[in-house]
Amino acid sequence: MRVAVTSPFFHFFPHLKDELLEQYPDAKFKEQFPSIGGDELVEFCQGYQGAIIGLDRFDDYVLSRLPELKVIGLCSAGADHIDPAAMKKHGVRMGWVAGINKVAVSEMTISHIINIMRNFHKFSNQMYDGNWPSLRNGALLNGRTVGLHGCGHIGKEVVKRLIPFGVNILACDRLDFSDFYEEYGVEAVDQEELWARSDVLSLHLSRNATTIGLYSADVLAKLKQGVYLVNTSRGNIVDEVALKSRLESGDIAAAAFDVYAVEPAIDDPLFALPNFFGTPHTGAGADEAWEAMARSGIKGLTENWIPEPGEYPYD
């Protein structure tokens, strides 16, 4: 099988590149880091039976022009850049490992929570601007009620890391994780209770038809006054215009996001707010996570299936 590799991870781990070439000597590697799509993606993958990809978008336009392509191995935590209907239509298989970056994202989540509660980002910016903050106050995580919207692979890892902080943990998920909740002292709640009670609310949702736009202006208005909001999951889940308004009013005390409705996020109005902290979709940005994701892409060439629209992870 000839394999086209669009994921940039292999350039950072030459030993993985060598391992892949031993299995697939005709593999070729894309040099640029940014994801590609459309005609550029078609041209790169033309004549190849397999692809190992990052966040490159495979839709009907692309797949209809790649008749030889049979399998795609994903080096990503999410799979929302793959169109399952198009994959099924063209009989292309997908290899994907859910939660592959769960440790990296969970560590980032804890960091983001503490950062915005203690105002570290704001104070650092003031220092960099040549000012020594006269008031250096913040709030403790200890004793707070932390709500997790989504308690799958990443949410569970966040729970484990929250316990030493002495917090009360709420979780809302469409699946039944009662055994896990009992083991770690998590209280299962519905969405309304999650929004009403959480001092800190952290989102760990996949992006699908049920979650896109879920955190609308109306839902943000239901959050507890002075809540701290963290999103390290996916963009387009939170209405960013409504978020900006509630940050400006103080209804939401502070927010930290790693994902945005439009990426790359350049000159986003949220960045001008002192109580907003943003990172550039780098939740998986740890060497260990990148290597694991690259290996999952290789594995996906031999362990795969044809995705079904409406079934996980497209439900």
Image (spheres, rainbow, N blue to C red):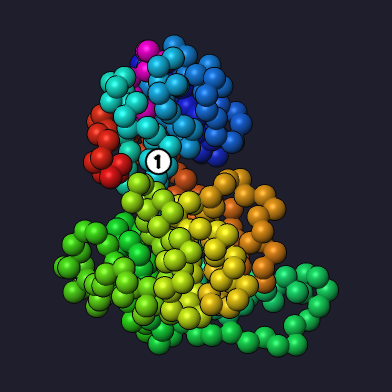
Circle 1 is placed at which residue position? Answer: 80
- Asked whether the viewer can see residue 274, the reply is yes
What residue range appears in magenta?
66-73
**Percent coordinates x, y for residue 247 in the rendering:** 58, 71
Q: Residue at x 43, y 28 (%)?
A: 58
Residue 69 among those drawn in magenta: yes
Q: SS class of the residue under badge 1?
A: loop
Q: Residue at x 59, y 65 (%)?
A: 244
**Pointer 1: residues within 10 angstroms few (<14), some, or many (20+)?**
some
| Name of the residue lying farthest toward the left | 179
| Name of the residue lying farthest toward the right | 130
The quarter of the picture where residue 310 lies is top left
The quarter of the picture where residue 51 lies is top left
Left-right relation of 96 to 126: left
Q: Residue at x 46, y 72 (%)?
A: 221
Quadrant placement of the N terminus: top left
Q: Nearer the viewer, residue 291 or 304?
A: 304
Q: Is residue 10 above or below residue 208?
A: above
**Percent coordinates x, y for residue 206 in the rendering:** 37, 51
Residue 139 among those drawn in magenta: no
Count numbered badges in the picture. Answer: 1
Q: Residue at x 52, y 28 (%)?
A: 37
Q: Is residue 34 above or below residue 126?
A: above
Question: Which amino acid, by three-letter code, is at mark 1?
Answer: Asp
Q: Is residue 265 above or below residue 216?
A: above
**Percent coordinates x, y for residue 76 in the rendering:** 42, 42
Quadrant placement of the C terminus: top left
